[in-house]
Image (tube, rainbow, N blue to C red):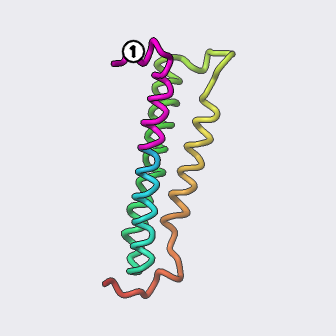
Amino acid sequence: MNSTLLRLGLLPVACAVVVDLQALYVLLASASARISALRTHDFDRARSLGTLGPSMVLLLFMSGFVTVGGEWFQMWRSIAWNGLDPAFRNTVYALFGLVLMHLPSESWVGRDPR
């Protein structure tokens, strides 16, 4: 199957479709969790589910690109493509999002758990 897709030049397209479908699934799951949390005022559940996204970004960019790509494959030596700076920026953005997500909010204080 892969050799047929590779021969026809469709393997990158097939991989992109699979990744897009996975991203769509995650987006729909997070949207339904957000809507559910807004209806029931269960902000702790929404916050815990919202932590998954930035945590996966941290795992991918920090461990994947910075640690493995930067040190094991010595990406920092490449003049043509050095992805350490963009990976570090994405890591900082995810950490900033996590900090903002877990700050206390006045609208969340005093709500009775249902």
> With respect to residue 34, does 77 lie above or below?
above
Taking the spot 36% from the left edge, 69% from the top edge, the residue there is: 45
- Image location (x, y in percent) of residue 111: 41, 86
Taking the spot 46% from the left edge, 63% from the top edge, the residue there is: 31
Snapshot quadrant of residue 48: bottom left
Q: Mark 1 sits on what residue? A: 4
- Image location (x, y in percent) of residue 28: 43, 57
Taking the spot 49% from the left edge, 24% from the top edge, the residue there is: 12
Decide: few, some or many residues near mark 1? Use Cα within 10 Å; few <14, some 14-19, many ≥20. few
Q: Nearer the viewer, residue 7 or 98?
A: 7
Q: Main secondary structure of the magenta part?
A: helix
> With respect to residue 51, does 4 lie above or below?
above
Residue 27 is left or right of residue 40, and the answer is right
Residue 3 inside the magenta-drawn segment: yes
For this orientation, the residue located farthest to the left is: 114
Q: Nearer the viewer, residue 2 or 39?
A: 2
Q: Nearer the viewer, residue 33 or 111?
A: 33
Figure disc tally: 1
Taking the spot 33% from the left edge, 19% from the top edge, the residue there is: 1
> With respect to residue 4, does 25 lie above or below?
below
For the record, the magenta segment spans 1-21
Q: Secondary structure at mark 1?
A: helix
Residue 75 inside the magenta-drawn segment: no
**Image quadrant for the C terminus?**
bottom left
- Image location (x, y in percent) of residue 63: 45, 34
Snapshot quadrant of residue 112: bottom left
- Image location (x, y in percent) of residue 23: 46, 46
User: As shown in the figure, which amino acid type bears the numbered disc 1?
Assistant: Thr
